[in-house]
Amino acid sequence: MKKTVQFMILIVFASFITSIAGCRQGPKGEDEIVIGLSVPSLSHPFFIYLTKNVMDEAQKLGVEVIASDAGDVAARQMSIIEDFIVKDVDGVLMSPIGGNVLVHVGADNVEGGRVAARYLIAKLGGKGNVIELEGTPGASPAIDRKKGFEQELAGSNIKILASQTAEFQRAKGQSVMENLIQAYSDFEGVYAANDEMILGAVEAMEAHGIDASTVVTVGYDAIPDALEYIKQGKLNATIEQFPGEQARRALRFLVENIRDGKNPPSKEIYIKPVAIDKSNLGQAEDKVD
Amino acid sequence: MVLRKYGIFIAFITVVVILSIVCPSFLTWKNLLNIVRQSSIHGVMAVGMTFVILTAGIDLSVGSVLALTGVLCASFEHTGLPVLLIVIVTLGIGALIGTVNGLIITKGKVTPFIVTLGTMSAARGLAHIYTNGQPISGFGDGFRYIGASNFLGVPVPIIIFVLTILIAAVILRNTRLGRYTYAIGGNEEAVRLSGINVDRFKIAAYAISGLTAALGAIILTSRLNAGESIAGTGYELDVIASVVIGGTSLMGGRGGVWGTLIGALLIGIINNGMNLLVIPSYWQLVVKGSIIVGAALLDRLREK
């Protein structure tokens, strides 16, 4: 569930690998490039989408990608990377579960939180009460998205009535929102650190007869279900941080480095998060028909 | 004496009284209905778990079985099957998975912990494979009736929960299945030596647990308007905690569904109360853990 969108390129030179594994035979041609892809968890739509984009881009670039699921366990990700080295891959592309970042292509979750806050401030005219749903306690995207959101809101007259975790899960988003509705009735906005939670919250509000047009709702990640809700007018906005573009760009940097020895223009490359609502639905990477 | 007999009730009442005092929105009719409705999901699952724990077993797979049967029933709904058929087939699949657990445990003589740990992983994987990790969402009114509507002013999940408790109570009290469930947990060898087919009744307990996990899945999927392969992650903890703080012994043979009802409600009240009091996320984990252990401790005073 850790949506560490810091897409990291661990550039491992073929020669270096050869000296470790010591089993590569002879020079290799361009079409022999094999890259290992490690993501925290393949059980989340976000990383499935990201992996699919890597696979598609790999086909275009004519390289082979082996994907592996670390089940959200940092130690398992480490052994996956070790396996990659044993398998003698040319490079490793990973979305790390924590750890040191050598070079990364990613979206800034703090900035994404700010974008969400700015959207709410604009929609509410700079004042009012909101409820915040946080991600899994301790997960870095949960911390960053909360931080950016609250920093930006501090400059307005919007008050956060309550901020509670719903662990990035839709069912929890629903039950936590149901509980908060019991204690608070005077809120004009709800922000959730991912779409799953905001969709659960929207269902909870609908069941309690709260008119969707009276509350501004903002999610995060631009998953297909959220775009569908926006299209139906049940959700106001979501934050898109273009995971597909991140993944494609990261892979291009890695392949350029292996093929031509070229270095990325910078150690850290960020893709700017954007608020998607009904007015710019077409900008979302995932499309709804 | 009172403490010995009613330990769990005292823990329950204490939490209710404290929350009523510190939080005015807690003790309202609307919020109480809300708590029972939320508890109905882990509650029905805990009813099945009670059977398993009474035989001195454990079923760790319930959260994953919920995910698998949940995505299956969501996809059945999208094919336009009649709601009654969806319910029957989904419950059947849950019972089938439970039966497989039971068969491996009894015929294969592998400990329940390991078998259901394996099923926990495999069922979760199958749910991911079936959906490719994507949610299946948006259902018709017929299916949504189960989780998101009222019957005579009472939320339907609560009615399902109460009926499940009543049926289980009758089974445990008045049927051979119920009596042998207790007897097996009390002294399996003695039951076996008296010529009773122990395996059959143990398999039945796991089948019931699979069935109630599927029932929880139907309620959750309908209520959430989505079936997801990540649903029910970590539910086994709430479910097992409900049973154990409800006074059913992990050693088997002692306890029952009425205690489980109180245990499930206590878990629901803790979750609700922490939201109402806006307890910070990190502290919620500590508070919940402490209350569970405290309630279990209080209950154990009975045994002394």
Image: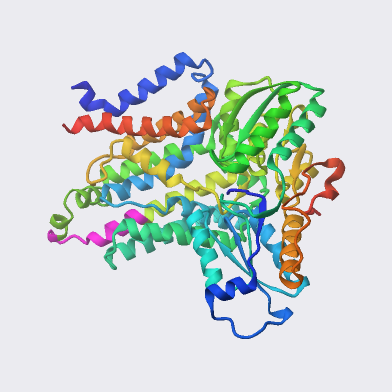
Residue B1 horizontal side relative to residue A276, left or right: left
Provide residue B99's location: percent of width, then percent of height.
37, 61
Exactly how many numbered labels are in the figure? 0
Q: Position of residue B296 (x, y in %)?
A: 30, 33
Q: Depth check: A193 or B157 in front?
A: A193
B77 up-or-down from B40: above or below: below
Q: Main secondary structure of the magenta part?
A: helix
Q: Which residues are magenta?
A: B193-206
At 29% from the left and 68% from the top, the residue drawn is B108
Where residue A38 sits in the image (x, y, percent)?
Answer: 59, 61
Q: Quadrant of residue B249?
A: top left
Identify the image quadrant of the C terminus of chain A: bottom right
- Left or right: residue B135 compared with residue B19: right
Measuring 33% from the left and 25% from the top, which residue is drawn there? Answer: B11
Image vertical order of residue B283 relative to residue A198, above or below = above
Q: Position of residue A144 (x, y in %)?
A: 64, 38
- Left or right: A128 as drawn, with respect to A278: left
